[in-house]
Image: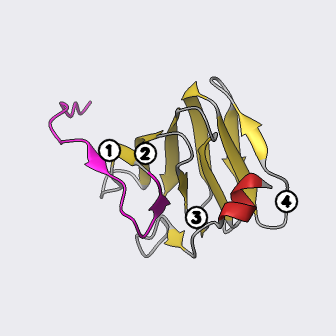
Amino acid sequence: MKITHSSGPTAQGPADWFTGTVFLDSIRTPDEQSAVGSAHVRFAPGARTAWHKHPKGQTLYVTDGIGYVARRGGDVVQIRPGDVVYIEPNEEHWHGAAVDRFMAHVAIHEADDQGETVIWLEHVTDDEYRA
């Protein structure tokens, strides 16, 4: 058993990865013991990720608020607390808060053989977000 006590500060999401105000609390970073990584991510109203994909897929567990998720070429779908979203490996997608609500989720992903967990792409446009 390994216990890691909370010690790291909450980080603001980088502008290259997010639109709007987003805060990240790391839960686990992949290492030599496990390829699994996870974070608690909190989005202010209207905030969202850029388009991105995960070589080994991603699971989102919504913990608070109301948000949206969409895959490239698909509809924007509303997500709420308790919802679990599985994103297929290399499926281009985005997720974030509703226009007028905060949203938080736990994001879980696995590193590939090169240690990569995510590949960031272009920002989601306002038109894509409001679709």
Residue 40 at x, y percent in the picture: 42, 38
Vertical placement of residue 71 versus 7, above or below: below
Q: Which residue is mark 2?
A: 38
Per the image, the residue denoted by label 3 is 54
Dot 3: element: loop
Please tell me which residue lies in front, 114 or 91: 91
Mark number displayed over residue 74? 4
Q: Is residue 4 left or right of residue 90?
A: left
Mark 4 secondary-structure assignment: loop
Q: Which residue is mark 1?
A: 26
Does the image show residue 98? yes
Q: Which residues are drawn in magenta? A: 1-20
User: Residue 96: image x %, image y %?
Assistant: 58, 47
* Image height of 86 relative to 55, above or below: above
Residue at image position (32%, 44%) is 26
> Is any part of residue 88 visible from this angle?
no
Instruction: Locate residue 42, reporting x and y percent.
Output: 44, 38
Q: Label 2 vs label 3: CA separation?
A: 13 Å
Indicate the secondary structure of the residue bearing disc 1. Answer: strand
**What residue is rendered at 64% in x and 23% in y?**
82
Q: Is residue 36 left or right of residue 29?
A: right
Is most of the magenta stretch helix, strand or loop? loop
Question: Considering only order in the chain, which callout, 1 or 3, is on the residue closer to the N terminus?
Answer: 1
Question: Could you give the CA–CA distance between mark 4 and mark 2, rounded to whole angstroms?
Answer: 25 Å
Along the viewing direction, whichever of 47 and 74 lies nearer the viewer: 47
